């Protein structure tokens, strides 16, 4: 029974690819031929791995226009070499002009971080979100509704991850040579599709504080 289900799942994937190949083949704009030669995106999207928040669809962009990194709860920590490698390539090779950290309401990772439940190895990753809660516990604890608590932590988590990105040597060195680069914090409302700007944008290290801002 399982083998049949798995086979049907694979067939569906390959059928979808056939449809995509037909689209590429019949395209008259030449954009796919151009993409085959390389990419030149202006945006790095750091988002949640949740299947409901695809970057291109949410931003109305085409293949080749958004460079994407996703993980559980859109975390940006200085010990994550995968994220740092993507960031370094995006900033220093692709020369992206915008980095969007995109959280979303109803995030399972954030909800889990607010509980005392154990889930497995992911608990160690969720500690990064618990740290955000620790910084803002008084504000979050004052909210009665659990849904509203989670939504607030989603927003605060985005803000903290934006700050973390700004404090990386990669971003600060780009600013140091006057490379145009803006870091934005946004939240997705899945039920409406809206990408909400948190007005949390940095274009230099001037407002990071003297301990974090490199010379």
Image (spheres, rainbow, N blue to C red):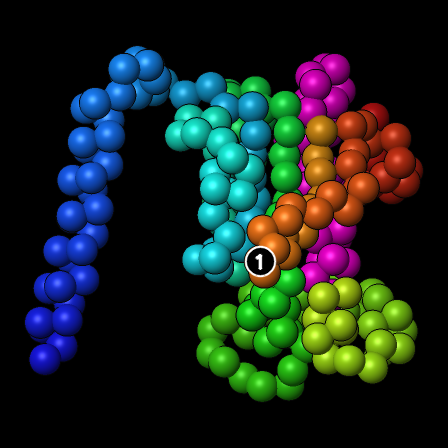
Q: Is residue 193 above or below residue 116?
A: above
**Secondary structure mostly seen in the magenta stretch:** helix
Q: In this view, does 121 lie above or below 152?
A: below
Q: Is residue 34 left or right of residue 117?
A: left
Which residue is painted at 50% across and 24% down in the image?
41
Which residue is painted at 89% across and 77% down in the image?
142
Q: Is residue 29 above or below residue 191?
A: above
> Which percent across, then down, holds residue 119?
50, 80
Quadrant where the C terminus is found in the figure:
top right
Q: Is residue 1 magenta?
A: no
Total numbered labels placed on residues in the image: 1
Which residue is disc 1 drawn over? Answer: 190
Question: How many residues crowd around disc 1 within 10 Å: few (fewer than 14), some, or many (20 or more)?
Answer: some
> Which percent across, then down, holds residue 37?
31, 15
Q: In this view, does 101 lie to the left or right of 211?
A: left
Quadrant location of residue 34? top left
Which residue is painted at 84% across and 77% down in the image?
143
User: In this orientation, does residue 161 appear?
Assistant: no
């Amino acid at each position: 029974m399982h083998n049949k289900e798995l086979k049907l799942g694979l067939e569906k994937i390959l059928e979808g690819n056939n449809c995509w190949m037909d689209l590429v083949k019949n395209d008259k704009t030449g954009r796919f031929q151009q993409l085959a030669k390389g990419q030149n995106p202006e945006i790095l999207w750091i988002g949640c791995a949740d299947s409901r928040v695809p970057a291109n669809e949410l931003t109305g962009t085409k293949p080749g226009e958004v460079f994407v990194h996703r993980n559980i709860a859109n975390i940006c920590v200085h010990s994550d070499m995968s994220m740092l490698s993507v960031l370094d390539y995006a900033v220093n090779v692709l020369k992206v002009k915008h980095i969007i950290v995109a959280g979303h309401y109803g995030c399972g990772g954030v909800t889990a971080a607010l509980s005392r439940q154990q889930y497995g190895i992911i608990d160690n990753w969720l500690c990064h979100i618990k740290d955000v809660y620790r910084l803002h516990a008084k504000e979050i604890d004052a909210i009665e509704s659990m849904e509203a608590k989670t939504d607030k932590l989603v927003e605060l988590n985005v803000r903290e991850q934006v700050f973390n990105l700004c404090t990386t040597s990669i971003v600060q060195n780009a600013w140091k040579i006057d490379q145009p680069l803006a870091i934005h914090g946004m939240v997705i409302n899945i039920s409406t599709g809206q990408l909400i700007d948190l007005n949390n944008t940095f274009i230099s290290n001037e407002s990071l504080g003297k301990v974090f801002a490199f010379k």
